[in-house]
Image (spheres, helix red, strand yellow):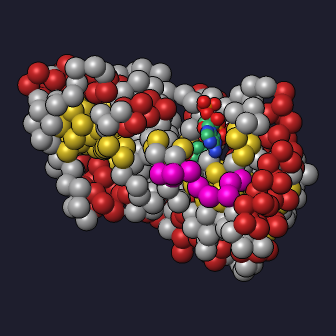
Amino acid sequence: MTIENTRADNFTSILNNYKAKIVNADEAVRCIKSHNKIIIHSNCAFPSALVEAMVRRKDELEQVEIYHALTVGELPYLRPGMEGHFLHNAAFIGSNAREAVQDGRADFIPIFLSELPLLYKNGRIKIDVALIHVSPPDEHGFCSYGVEVGLTKTGAESASIIIAQVNKNMPRTLGDSFIHVSKINYMIESDEPIKELPRLEVITPDMADVYSKIGGNIAGLIEDGSTLQLGIGAIPDAVLGYLYEKKALGIHTEMFTDGVIDLVDRGIITNEMKTIHPGKIIAGFVLGTRKLYDFIHNNPLIEFHRQEYVNDPYIISKNYKMVAINSAIEVDLTGQVCSDSIGTKLFSGFGGQVDFIRGAARSEGGKPIIALPSSAKNNTISKIVPFLKQGAGVVTSRGDVHYVVTEYGVAQLFGKCVRERVKELVNIAHPDFREDLMKYAVDNKYV
Ligand code: COA
């Protein structure tokens, strides 16, 4: 028997195995029971057909707990009338879950994303059923987790039952990104378009100017040969537009967006200077458009890994000149960074901010950066504040913070006393608020 014949036989058996598991969506979710804990594929991999089938069973189900991080699109289990049937636990609050969390109809788990998958793996959150969204099996029987590998793979592997929505539109991404059909209990076929999250558009010319200055200030900190992490929000996205003069950049990041494609095409992101995974972009997931999904499909330039690996500060620190760029809601005069809440209103989450800030701090030549506009709401609120709003949470502590960047410049806080920190931060605050900030600092004996 030739190798070709053996392969053909194997493939036929894989296909038969695959076809035997295909059911319709309503049949697939029949195994979900009241009080089950369900992990749902996060970000743009949200498997809508399976989720809709699950919520169609709401009258038969009580207290089904749903776990995931950011997702894109409507969350059917947060619709009116779902209370008591489903409870959502958000590990990162997206705009689709914000109102529910703030109203007390959904819960929030403050967690470093490097540790989220371990909650499932270690059984602290014992997952009964995983709803995942994957590419069709390849000739070896492996389906790819596609646009979101990092936050879901470990959780799905911890589940008692795995249900997969198989979609030919899901890119086949490479790395530690696969699940074999033999591990999946039920499969449905659904070719809905993969959800997209276009790059945040800068709405007003004022903000365009602010983002442009912040991008320029950050670019000034990035040396050729650096490896970058880009957090979530308008600023990390905007920075990409200011790197055209750089050389030999690398990417090791929790997530990336469409903006990376242009820098790869121009030969600016080469990954050649990376000291861990040289030549490769390393990420956990992407947030973007079909253009990005086509770029990552079967692309050996990019390796996706579990978030507990990508976001591990020790792994991050092995990158020489690691630059982490993350944003914030507000920063107080001592350097405490609030990024997940606006006062008592829970807004987003830790994400990988602390993981990457710490990893970059430990990297040789590394630079952990918090970047934010100096003000919000048409210059009526300063984002450099004397003290954090009542109820606001610290994500990055004042011990971890190194660089804070606004459109007015760069404050270097690491190793500096509070007196020096106040001066650095007041200098990059919006001019309308500098006098009041300094008065507070004087009144409280900071300076
Ligand atoms: N006081 C009151 N409101 C404020 C504020 C402040 N200090 N700062 C921001 N806001 C409001 C804005 O006006 C805006 O409101 P709107 O939507 O009504 O216009 C909203 O909060 C969001 O602010 P914006 O500056 O547009 O946010 P962004 O999209 O740039 O994201 C973070 C910034 C901090 C929310 C985001 O980076 C985040 O969630 N970070 C935490 C996790 C993280 O960094 N992870 C990294 C890897 S994923």
- Looking at the rendering, the stretch of residues picked out in magenta corresponds to 384-392
Q: 337 or 359: nearer the eye?
A: 337
Residue in view at x 47 percent, y 37 percent: 94
The percent coordinates of residue 117 (x first, y second) are 36, 57
The residue sitting at the front extreme is 443
Relative vertical location of residue 420 with respect to residue 137 in this rendering, above or below: below
Q: Specify the quarter for ligand 1.
A: top right
Relative vertical location of residue 262 with respect to residue 250 in this rendering, above or below: above
Residue 388 within the magenta-colored segment of the rendering: yes
Left or right, 352 with reference to 178: right
Left or right, 436 with reference to 156: right
The percent coordinates of residue 9 (x first, y second) are 28, 41
Left or right, 91 with reference to 440: left
Main SS, magenta residues: loop
Relative vertical location of residue 375 with respect to residue 24 in this rendering, above or below: below
The percent coordinates of residue 83 (x first, y second) are 21, 28
Residue in view at x 72 percent, y 61 percent: 440
Left or right, 304 with reference to 130: right
Question: Image quadrant for the C terminus?
Answer: bottom right
Residue 31 sits in quarter: top left
Residue in view at x 16 percent, y 23 percent: 58
The residue sitting at the right extreme is 245
